[in-house]
Image (cartoon, helix red, strand yellow):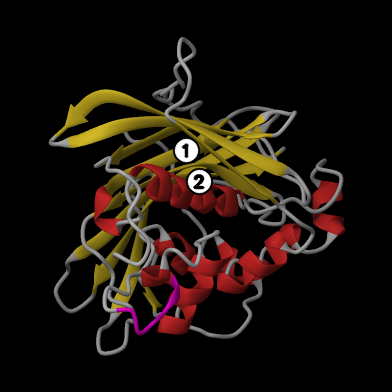
Amino acid sequence: MPGPGVGFEYPPTAVSWLKRDVLLFAQSIGCTSDELHFLYELHPNFAVFPTYPVILPFKKDTQEVIDFYAAQKAVKIPGVPDFDHTRVVDGQRLVQFFKPLPPTSAGKKFEVRTKVLGVYDKGRPGTVIENQTDLVDAATGEVYTRAIGSAFFVGQGNWGGPKGPATENFPAPKDRKPDAVFETLTSAETALLYRLNGDYNPLHATPEPGKKMGFGGVIIHGLYSFNWAAHGLLQHLGGSDPANIKEYQARFASPVRPGDKLVTSAWRTGQFKDGWEEIRFEVKVDGGKVCLSNGRALMKCVAPAPKGKL
């Protein structure tokens, strides 16, 4: 018998984007001037960075700022409690890439279609809601990307729900040096830039929500770290070619604060699935904890692309 909320489908949500949105996203996650195909709209191979769709459930079809809390509370899942969306963080996320996005949604009608895969009571720490979200061409039903992700509602457990299954782990190798290492130094403005993509959670802009949740103040979007690491993997192992990544996932293990230096270590495994090599990676705060664990990607690994050749 399925658990509470399982199979519930949210109403489809219209989404749209402009070339300007695509440029902003690429800039905000660290794409460089060597990758003009992500940063210059007149480049002959101008492309949407593959993980861009993760922003669309937040952005929806508007160019205006969104009331994050009101938007998240709009739909109730039957059979589970009402949770406080002012105390929610990302748990983990897997994204599968089926078809490249056009540089703008103009001329097509796109929707995100989301259904509940599970609602899990983790006791005192909180509750996990796991969803599947597809980005779909509404006219044809064609799925461009699929994201399977979980939201963790801090301190909102003990309501009698199922504990949920054990998650599959993809630990980073400990017996050899990584094949790629890259880093970035965040600043007080990192999250303030990233939020302009459409993820306007106040947790990442003003200290009050973070203090209430026990973080001590502002933390950087988990999805900033997620997207920044995806860019680094593609840049260092995939020749900055968006066609060279098929699947990407990570678990949000600990918060990142403005000013933290992020360091990613990535390992090629030599194991292939349908021609795609499995990559393992983890992201640490320099001198501190792992912030993205369980990192795994399916990629085609190539030498870095010569400058200006993409």
Secondary structure under tag 1 reads strand
Rendered residue at 65%/41% (across/down)? 262
Residue 38: x %, y % from top left: 40, 69
Which span of residues is magenta-colored? 39-43
Residue 204: x %, y % from top left: 73, 59
Looking at the rendering, in which quadrant would you find the C terminus?
bottom left
Rendered residue at 44%/17% (across/down)? 173
One can see residue 40 in this view: yes
| Residue bearing the label numbered 2 | 229
**Of residues 188 and 16, the one drawn nearer to the viewer in this rendering:** 188
Residue 54 shown left or right of residue 1 in the figure: right
| Residue bearing the label numbered 1 | 250
Residue 143 shown left or right of residue 8 in the figure: left
* Tag count: 2
Residue 307 shown left or right of residue 162 in the figure: left
Q: Separation of disc 2 and disc 1 at Cα?
A: 10 Å
Rendered residue at 80%/50% (across/down)? 210
Looking at the rendering, in which quadrant would you find the N terminus?
top left
**Of residues 196 and 85, the one drawn nearer to the viewer in this rendering:** 196
- Label 2 crowding class (10 Å Cα cut-off): few <14, some 14-19, many 20+? many
Point out which mark residue 105 bears. Answer: none
Assess whether mark 1 and mark 2 are in contact (beta carbons under 8 angstroms).
Answer: yes
Residue 291: x %, y % from top left: 63, 35
